[in-house]
Image (tube, rainbow, N blue to C red):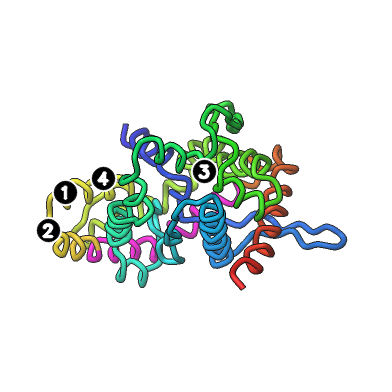
Amino acid sequence: MKQKAFVAAAVTAVLCCVAGCDVQTKQQATPDVEVRDLTVREEIEIGRAEERLVKTCMEEKGHRYWELPVPGVDERKAGRYVTDDVEWARKHGYGRGFEERSEEIRRTDPTTVYQNKLRPPERAAFNRALDGDYRDRMSVELPGGTGTVDAPRGGCANEARAKLYGDSEAWFVTRKTIEGILPLYGRDLMEDARLKKPLAKWARCMKEAGRPFADPGRLRRNRMVVTDGMPSAKAHEFDRTLAVLDATCARKTSLAEIMRALETSYREKALQRYERERDDYRTMRLHALREAEDVLS
């Protein structure tokens, strides 16, 4: 029962639940152009360029728009199932500060404040300009038959992506496919027998430190219960202390390292059936990076 609970909690976590978004797939090359994965900083640059393009497009259509902040390198490390980055844990705990910042942005975002002050017809026109007509939608079936996702065509958001990636609908389909493969291997990964020993070592390490938890999933669920209702400063301190112990044990026992290696292996195997989509994904992102450099220059 304990193992089943561990698996269920882990598999239903976010895409980067296992050990972060550091997993890199094998690089391939064409005769003339290297096809590779982007660095986190390059992803951030594309995000900033997309916001810049949306702002320009909205203003050209007669609407006001303020660029949203793009999550930085440290913020993108939050939400991992397990980490061995002790310094990050010492500084950020489990990312509570980022959660609070996101909530503050949602409450005070100038675009949202402006939009909410518009009369209903003006607000509808703003939404169409930004996101397109909700009656005209693009869709894609997710890997493994786990469902279908759709989104509106058109609007400044898609115009920005078309500028960056070359074709907004092709990018939507490709991105949802490649970034949606976790269900194809997530359960097998978390049930892999090679995790049993490092998990036991991690649990023993945590118990010796006075924090007896069977696995990182239980630790995180308990942390949320304990800190619920705590004053912010006290919750931050609690998180940092616990996160440092967690990361230290993950490093000493090699739990995070082993999970990253297993994640890479399982992900590579799952991606074998999506070779064309993976090449398209990398190529389109590299195109977006080149466009982003021009947009931000």
Is residue 263 in the magenta section?
A: yes
Res 254 visible: no
Please state, as top left, top right, bottom left or bottom right, where the C terminus lies in the image. Answer: bottom right
Tell me residue 20's x, y (percent): 47, 56
The image's mark for residue 221 is 4
Quick one: SS at disc 4?
helix
Q: Amino acid at mark 4?
A: Arg
Q: Amino acid at mark 2?
A: Pro
Residue bearing mark 1? 228
Q: Is residue 53 above or below residue 268?
A: below
Q: For this view, does 192 lie left or right of residue 1?
A: right
The image's mark for residue 185 is none
Residue bearing mark 3? 129
Residue bearing mark 2? 231
Quick one: SS at disc 1?
loop
Quick one: SS at disc 2?
loop
What range is drawn magenta here?
240-265
Q: Nearer the viewer, mark 1 or mark 4?
A: 1
Please identify the dominant SS of the magenta region: helix
Query: Going from the N terminus, do you reach mark 2 or mark 4 first?
Result: 4
Tell me residue 105's x, y (percent): 32, 57
Q: Quadrant of residue 154?
A: top right
Mark 1–mark 4 distance (CA, rounded to whole Å):
11 Å
Q: Is residue 153 above or below residue 221?
A: above
Q: Amino acid at mark 1?
A: Asp
Name the residue: 66% across, 49% down. 162
